[in-house]
Structures are given as C-alpha cells and as structure tokens.
C-alpha cells in the first residue's frame, strides 16, 4: 500500500513538472511567433514603405523644370508626390500619408571640386531645383490638434508589451546626368534644299529665296558687272555717229536679240561647230536670230551686225563684230580675279551654259551671282574649296544648326550636369569622321564647332558608320561611370561610305553601341534619308527614331526639327540617389 502511494505521488509530481514545462514552452512558442511573424511583417512593411517613397520621389522628380517658375514647379512636384504616395499600400494603411510641408523637400545637387562629390542643399533658396527628397514615416507625432499615431500595429508582440513599431525611410531622386555625343551629317547634300536641283520638289520660289538669303549672308558681294538675279548678257557696240548706228546684242546662247538705232541690213552668225549663217534683206531696227537646219540649237560664238555704214567696223567688212566665246563672256561681265582656289570664271561660264540644274531653274545662258552660289554649292562645297560658306543659310544644314542650338540651350538651362561632345561625318582622314569635341560641360565651346562648318566641309560623302564609331570610342573612353550614355545620330541621306557594305557597318556599329550601354537616338531629315536603317539602329540600342520628312516650307521644316531636338533634350532618365 505504501509502495502504491509512493508511485502515485511520484506520477503526480511528474505530471506537475510536465505542466510547468509545457507552460514555459508555450510562452517560448508565443515569443518565437511574435519574433518571426512580426519581424517578417515589419520587413514587408519596410519594403512597402521604401517602394512607396521611391515611387513618389520619382514622380515628383518628373516635374522638375529649371526653365519654369520655381514656385509653380514646387507645387507640381508636391502634388505628384502626394498623389503617388496615396496609391501605395504600406502595412495596414491603404496609402502612404505624407506631411506635404515636412516630408517633401526640393533642392539642388551641385558638384564640389574640393570634395570631388555632389553636395545636396534644400530649401527655397536652392533653386533652380534639380532634386527631390521624400521621407516616409510610420511614427507617432504631436501636432497642435493632438497626437497622430501612424505606427505599424503588430500581431503577437503586444503579448510581450509592444503593440506598435515605428518605421522611417527616405529617398532622393533627380534626372540622371547624361554624357551625350552629337553625331551630325555634314555631307555635301546638306545644302541640297537651297540648290537648283531641289526646285522640282520644293518649288522655284523656296529655292531661289534660300539662295538669295545666302548671298545676303555673304554680304551681298559684287563680281564685275554681273547682277545677282541671272539675266541674259547684253553687249553694246560703238556709240552712234551719223550713219554709223549704236547696236546692242543680247546673247541667249543659241540665239541673239539685236537692236540698232538704224535699220538692220545683214546679220551673220558663227556657231560652235564653225559654221556661218547669213540673214540678209533686213529692214527692221531689231530682231532675234538663231541657226536653222544643221545650225539649229547650236551655240553662237560670233555675231556680225551690218547697219547703216558700219560695214568696215570689222576686219571681215561684215559690219560690227560681237564675240561670245567663254573668255569673251568673262570679259563682257567684268569678271577679273576669281575669289577662291577651286573653280574659275571660265568654268563658271561653262557651268551656266551646260548644267541641267541651271536649265531646270530657267537660267541657262543667264549669268548672275545666284548661279555662282549654286555653282559653289554643287561643285565646290568643301571648306578647302570655297571657305566661308558656313556663314550662309544653306538648307537643311542651317535648320540642323538651329535645332542643335535648341538642344544645347535646353541642357544649359536645366543645369543637370550633362556633358556634350561632337562628331562630324564624313572626313578624308583614315577614320572617316572627326571628333570635333570630346565630352565637355562647356556648352559654349560646342556651338562654334557645328555652326562654323559647311555642307561637305571636309568631304562630300556620307559615312554614318564612322561618325558613330568615333562617338562610341569617346563615350567608352571618357564617359563618367554615373552618367547615362547617349548618342544622337542625324542624317539626311543614305550611307555611301565606306564603299564596301556601308549600311551593314552601321548596323554592326549599333550593336557595338548596345554592348557599351549607349542609347542611340536617330533623326532622319528629308525624303532621301534611310529611315528604315535609322529605325533599326534605334531599336537595337533601345533608342528612339525621329523622322522629319521633306517637302514642307523651311519654316515648318525648322519647327519640326526643333521639336525633335527638344524632345531629345527632354528625354532624361530618372535616377534615385543615395540620401545624405
């Protein structure tokens, strides 16, 4: 009996011990649950808070605009931040609640040469704003109207005396600085819209008005007695004296118009084929004469006009002689010293007499400075041939220059620490293109480089591949690690250099850019540009292709191109920065 009692007592004692141990274990389980579940919940809420703050900060940064009223900008930034924050769930809250005046700050980041790092400053005086800082808080704060408790409620921790926890995080965003290379087409075709060859597409008025502006840009130079507007040349003979008349002969190439103060008797013509043709029995004081039969449409080189008693004014005794060979035409026009090393007055006269483009313009055998400017642009556009044409408003090159001004000015005004470089194609060097400027923040130094270049400045070809390669190598060598790499490639035509597979090399270079994390924005201008190729380049690198078709007025053309470069300038990647 006593043994049984002892065993029962021992069993009861053991059961009591198990109960105590179980209770202690239950407390441990609850503590573990509080630790694991609540800690996990806090981690999720912290991630949600950070995501909400990041999204709101980026939304606010999209409203930054250094060119606008900064008070208005601040309002737009805060509106955007508040809107996006309210859409992001954090913990048990359907949207992140921010204090508009405390949690949202606008300021600037500026490069410090002493510390070699960016320094943040915030407040109304840190303008123009280029950064936004947002602080997300799940905290308890005291306000004038009472205590506001936005702390995160916990699940199991209240058992241990902790009902809520505070969370706080921040984010700073700005537009990422860009390292941008401009790759511009300076082939000879960049003056085509102000050449006679474009009259069928653009109309005579647009082209001749453009050339007139170019002449004005040059300072309206005079060459001999040649007018600006092309006109047939009229040569006057000896002064009237009794029965010897005064005769004027207007040279029209294959015909001549003759006026005399006394009735004409005989007119004799000599042609470029050496033939002579005589017109006799004349009774009027004027007339137009040209070859017939085998002399039809043959150019006239000499004219003899017999009127009154002037027969002996020529050695042949055929009347007064007028000569219209090329050298004679140069002399009649008073053209003496040709202004440049390439070309000549004799070549210019032959050009006016034979060019199909001059004929299309209606100026064959008509001499004037308008034809001379077209002669330079068509035959001698390079700076080494006709220096100084860069001051002229050749199109579409001048529209491109003005559009580049739009881009550079925008970047300058935004003050976002962008850098710009410039490559021009094509060039006669072994590279096929030239780096006019490496990446620089001295924007004022870039403008003269693209403005003081003319169509076909170095050579007339179109080597898009070489221009891209030169620009890529500059970005690979000198782009900043933190900068967004970008290239803007503009062309008005088809690649024709190098001679072997020029389009294929452009595609290869696009893949090289992609591998170097360079986004290429492409711009095609006019109906001759290879839009498909430039679209492919943009697609390969993740860029955007813009096309400005030709055929419009220069004003509409320019506005369209400026709009494109404005969009490129504003195409800025956003970036979250480490908070300070």
Image (cartoon, rainbow, N blue to C red):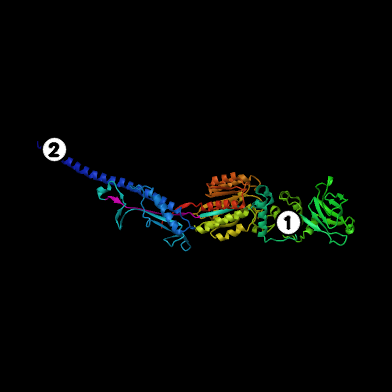
Which label lies toward us, 1 or 2?
1
**Is residue 73 in view?**
yes
Any magenta on residue 175? Answer: yes
Q: Which residues are magenta?
A: 162-177
Horizontal side of residue 121 vs 368, given as left or right? left
Q: Which mark is residue 368?
A: 1
Secondary structure at badge 2 equals helix
Question: Which quadrant is home to the N terminus?
Answer: top left
Q: Residue at x 70, y 52 (%)?
A: 378
Seen from the viewer's position, the closer of residues 37 and 336 is 336
Question: Which quadrant is home to the C terminus?
Answer: bottom left
Secondary structure at badge 1 equals loop
x then y, percent, for residue 420: 55, 56
For the view shown, which residue lies furthest in the bottom direction?
Answer: 114
For the view shown, which residue lies furthest in the left direction?
Answer: 1
Identify the residue position indicated by label 2 in the image. 8
x then y, percent, for residue 490: 59, 50
Seen from the viewer's position, the closer of residues 321 and 328 is 321
x then y, percent, for residue 30: 26, 45
Horizontal side of residue 235 vs 485, given as left or right? right
Which of pointers 1 and 2 lies earlier in the amino acid sequence? 2
Residue 401 image-quadrant placement: bottom right
Any magenta on residue 168? Answer: yes
């Amino acid at each position: 009996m006593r043994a049984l009692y002892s065993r029962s007592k021992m069993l009861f004692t053991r059961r009591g011990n198990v109960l105590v141990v179980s209770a202690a274990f239950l407390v441990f389980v609850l503590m573990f649950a509080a630790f694991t579940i609540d800690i996990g919940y806090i981690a999720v809420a912290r991630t949600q808070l950070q995501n909400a703050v990041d999204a709101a900060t980026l939304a606010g940064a999209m409203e930054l605009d250094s060119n606008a009223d900064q008070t208005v900008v601040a309002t737009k930034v805060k509106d955007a931040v508040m809107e996006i924050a309210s859409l992001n769930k954090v913990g048990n809250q359907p949207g992140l609640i921010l204090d508009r005046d405390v949690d949202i700050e606008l300021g600037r980041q500026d490069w410090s040469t002493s510390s070699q790092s960016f320094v943040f400053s915030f407040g109304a005086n840190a303008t123009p704003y280029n950064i936004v800082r947002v602080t997300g808080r799940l905290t308890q704060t005291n306000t004038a109207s009472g205590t506001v408790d936005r702390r995160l409620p916990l699940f199991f921790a209240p058992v241990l005396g902790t009902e809520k926890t505070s969370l706080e995080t921040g984010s700073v965003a700005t537009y990422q600085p860009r390292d941008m290379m401009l790759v511009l087409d300076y082939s000879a075709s960049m003056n085509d819209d102000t050449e006679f060859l474009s009259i069928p597409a653009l109309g005579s008025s647009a082209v001749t008005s453009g050339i007139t502006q170019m002449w004005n840009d040059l300072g309206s130079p005079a060459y001999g007695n040649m007018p600006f507007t092309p006109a047939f040349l009229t040569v006057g003979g000896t002064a009237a004296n009794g029965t010897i008349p005064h005769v004027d002969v207007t040279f029209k190439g294959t015909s001549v118009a003759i006026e005399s103060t006394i009735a004409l008797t005989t007119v004799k013509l000599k042609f470029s084929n050496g033939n002579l043709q005589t017109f006799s029995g004349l009774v009027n004081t004027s007339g137009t004469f040209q070859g017939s039969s085998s002399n039809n449409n043959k150019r006239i080189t000499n004219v003899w006009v017999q009127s009154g008693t002037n027969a002996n004014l020529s050695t042949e005794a055929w009347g007064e002689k007028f000569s219209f060979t090329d050298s004679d035409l140069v002399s009649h026009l008073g053209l003496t010293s040709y202004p440049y090393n390439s070309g000549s007055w004799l070549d210019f006269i032959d050009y006016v007499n034979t060019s199909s483009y001059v004929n299309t313009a209606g100026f064959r055998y008509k001499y004037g400075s308008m034809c001379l400017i077209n002669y330079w642009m068509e035959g001698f556009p390079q700076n080494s041939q006709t220096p100084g044409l860069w001051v002229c408003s050749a199109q579409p090159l001048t529209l491109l220059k003005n559009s580049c001004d739009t881009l550079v000015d925008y970047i300058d005004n935004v003050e976002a620490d962008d850098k710009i470089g410039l490559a021009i194609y094509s060039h006669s060097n072994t590279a096929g293109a030239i780096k006019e400027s490496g990446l620089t923040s001295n924007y004022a130094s870039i403008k003269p480089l693209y403005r003081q270049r003319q169509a076909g400045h170095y050579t007339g070809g179109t080597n898009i591949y070489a221009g891209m390669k030169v620009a890529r190598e500059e970005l690979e060598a000198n782009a900043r690690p933190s900068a967004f790499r970008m290239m803007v490639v503009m062309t008005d035509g088809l690649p024709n250099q190098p001679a072997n597979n020029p389009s294929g090399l452009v595609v290869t270079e696009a893949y090289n850019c992609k591998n170097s994390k360079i986004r290429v924005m492409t711009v095609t201008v006019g109906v001759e540009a290879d839009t498909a190729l430039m679209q492919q380049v943009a697609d390969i690198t993740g860029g955007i292709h813009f096309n400005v078709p030709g055929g419009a007025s220069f004003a509409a053309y320019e506005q369209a191109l400026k709009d494109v470069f404005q969009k490129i300038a504003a195409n800025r990647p956003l970036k979250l920065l480490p908070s300070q």
